Amino acid sequence: MSRYPVTFTQRAPRKVEKDAVEIIGSSSRANPFLSFRYSYTEISALGGKAHVKSKKTRLEDGKLTSETFEGELQRGTYEQLLKQAQRYFLGQTTLLLESLSCFLPPARKQPPDRD
């Protein structure tokens, strides 16, 4: 009796067609299990300069990316930015209140004072 009971015979490799295998792309881009974005910007003014800090972090397609930025602006640019942010906030507040105004009773006209 031989030491190895199973014998191995040499076979020629099979011929495979080039287009026989279909490659299926990853579905993670179409329907990710988890993805998020986070951004933070802080602007503060002291003296004649405004200091800007910004941070952005995102997780997409299994890749975590984080960016940070710091810089300085002139005071005039800071004030323009502040005015634009206030206008935007007031505009959004106006839209919200106008959409809720249909639930309020109609305003009565005040009769003129007769003195």
Image (cartoon, rainbow, N blue to C red):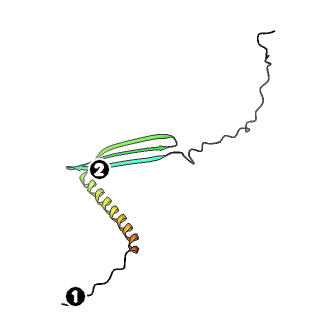
Which amino acid is tagged 1? Asp
Q: Secondary structure at mark 2?
A: strand
Please state if 25 lies on the left or on the right of 35 as rendered: right
Res 43 label: 2
Q: How many marks?
A: 2
Q: Give how far across and how far down residue 51 sits, in percent.
A: 27, 47
Residue lying farthest to the left in this orientation:
115
At x 29%, y 57%, the residue is 82
Q: Give how far across and how far down residue 3 sits, in percent.
A: 76, 10
Please state if 4 lies on the left or on the right of 42 as rendered: right
Q: Which residue is mark 1?
A: 113
Q: Give how far across and how far down residue 26 sits, in percent.
A: 60, 42
At x 29%, y 50%, the residue is 43
Q: Quadrant of residue 86?
A: bottom left
Quadrant the C terminus occupies: bottom left
At x 33%, y 64%, the residue is 90
Please state if 50 lies on the left or on the right of 106 as rendered: left
At x 34%, y 49%, the residue is 41
Upstream in the sequence, badge 2 or badge 1? 2
Mark 2, Cα crowd under 10 Å, few <14 / some 14-19 / many 20+, is some
Q: What's the distance in space between the residues labelled 2 and 1, CA to CA?
A: 51 Å
Which amino acid is tagged 2? Ile
Mark 1, Cα crowd under 10 Å, few <14 / some 14-19 / many 20+, is few
